[in-house]
Amino acid sequence: MVDRYFSNKSLKLGKRERTRSALIDSAIKVIAEKGFESASIKEITQAAGLANGTFYNHFTDRESLASEAAGVAIFEIALEIKEEVKDIEDGLDKVIVSSDKVVDRTINAPTWGKIIIGAWHHLDDFQQDVAQIMRSDLNLAKRQGLTSLPINKLLEYQICSLIVLSISLQLKNGRNKATRLETAEAILRLLGIAPAEAKQRAQKALFG
Amino acid sequence: MVDRYFSNKSLKLGKRERTRSALIDSAIKVIAEKGFESASIKEITQAAGLANGTFYNHFTDRESLASEAAGVAIFEIALEIKEEVKDIEDGLDKVIVSSDKVVDRTINAPTWGKIIIGAWHHLDDFQQDVAQIMRSDLNLAKRQGLTSLPINKLLEYQICSLIVLSISLQLKNGRNKATRLETAEAILRLLGIAPAEAKQRAQKALFG
DNA sequence: ATCAAATTTGAGATATCTCTCATTTATGGA
DNA sequence: TCCATAAATGAGAGATATCTCAAATTTGAT
């Protein structure tokens, strides 16, 4: 259960790490509930079962906690997914299967999804870090000659925006197979793949 | 100057309309400055030079004012652009020239750009209204046989997301011709156009 | 000029929030 | 077990915010 994900990961560690993780889990929950800009330090520390002053032993301000919380959430997801797609050799397949798994994870853990969306929209560093995560798969597809488009920062950001949109829409309206498929197809078309091939490839990569 | 855009439009109207417009102009400015969720009613009414209680004579809460402010901003932009592109017959050209002009307008008026971005991310109704604005051009392109892709809500939202990304990046990093061009190309690829044709078409439609 | 109605006002009740810091509690090595 | 250090605590100073409503002001028709 993701509610205490980082607290559980820290059980064997020292008090400082356990407290910090409690703040992170709480930040994820409260930011998802109240909104990226609206969640207060008071609510976060209260939900963590901690005193007011404890916050300032670990973070300078709300944004640094939010940044940390979103960062570890997406990092955790990326790590799991990297392992799951390591046997996929086709760079394009890797990109769309990874993207689909990100969406899947964030729908399964809506609080994580919401803070990631919020961080994507509010934090420049977060945007750069996320784009970085997928860059290697995009470069692989390029080296494999699967796309002729130049891979640049804007294209990476565009793909991320489509992923974030898919997360957002499915968190709102529920899981939707067509949205998953059409998001994968759209990413492929952004990468220069013709619609017919994009449809076929997405279908095969996502559903076998 | 957009700072008092709606106030100026209301000069000939009654006190109630002039006051409401002052709140809208102020909301645009304060929300752009403080953030969509963080801007307070107190700051908005103060920046408008109005008393605390005045707000509640016009709006029930912050979100209804924010929604109204973003709505009239995008509506105003859409109306101007509709007129400017009325002689463009090619549906795809209409889509990309309109998109480019939206970005242009919002970069020229950063406060409008920021509230529109904020509303796009926070307000479902706003998303639907914005997608609706471009639907007719997309349907025209479809009728003209310029794209074979089914035009559905997800595709509309995806195109809007790319436009919002372009606005966001250029507001942050300054105007950028390559970003404009590559955004137009990306929209065309989303619509199923091959990369080479997308590049050519975008170049021609945006730069003559 | 008058005056009913429309509209704004801003003090105040109430609540919430940030942040500090002297004190308390927990930790871990000796 | 002791104790120096690490870490948490939570009251309180100070500030900000929402919302109401009786009173004041503005408006526009007569």
Image (cartoon, coloured by chain):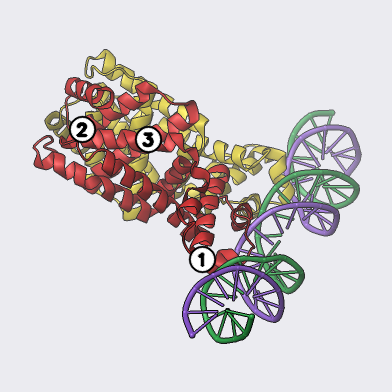
Chain colours: A red, B yellow, C purple, D green
- Closer to us: B205 or D5: D5
Q: Which residue is mark 3?
A: A103
Q: Amino acid at mark 1?
A: Arg
* Within-10-Å neighbours for mark 3: few <14, some 14–19, many 20+: many
CA distance for labels 1 and 3: 32 Å
Could you say where residue B208 lies in the image, as x and y percent from the top left? 17, 36
C13 with respect to D12 (left or right)? right
Q: Quadrant of residue A148?
A: top left
Q: Which residue is mark 2?
A: A93
A29 with respect to B196 (left or right)? right
Question: What number is the disc on residue B37?
Answer: none
Could you say where residue A156 lies in the image, as x and y percent from the top left? 26, 44
- Closer to us: A78 or B147: A78
Could you say where residue B9 lies in the image, as x and y percent from the top left? 54, 39
Q: Amino acid at mark 3?
A: Val
Question: What number is the disc on residue A16?
Answer: 1
Could you say where residue D3 lies in the image, as x and y percent from the top left? 60, 86
Secondary element at image label 3: helix
In this view, B103 is above or below A20: above
Residue at the spot x=13%, y=29% of the render?
B197
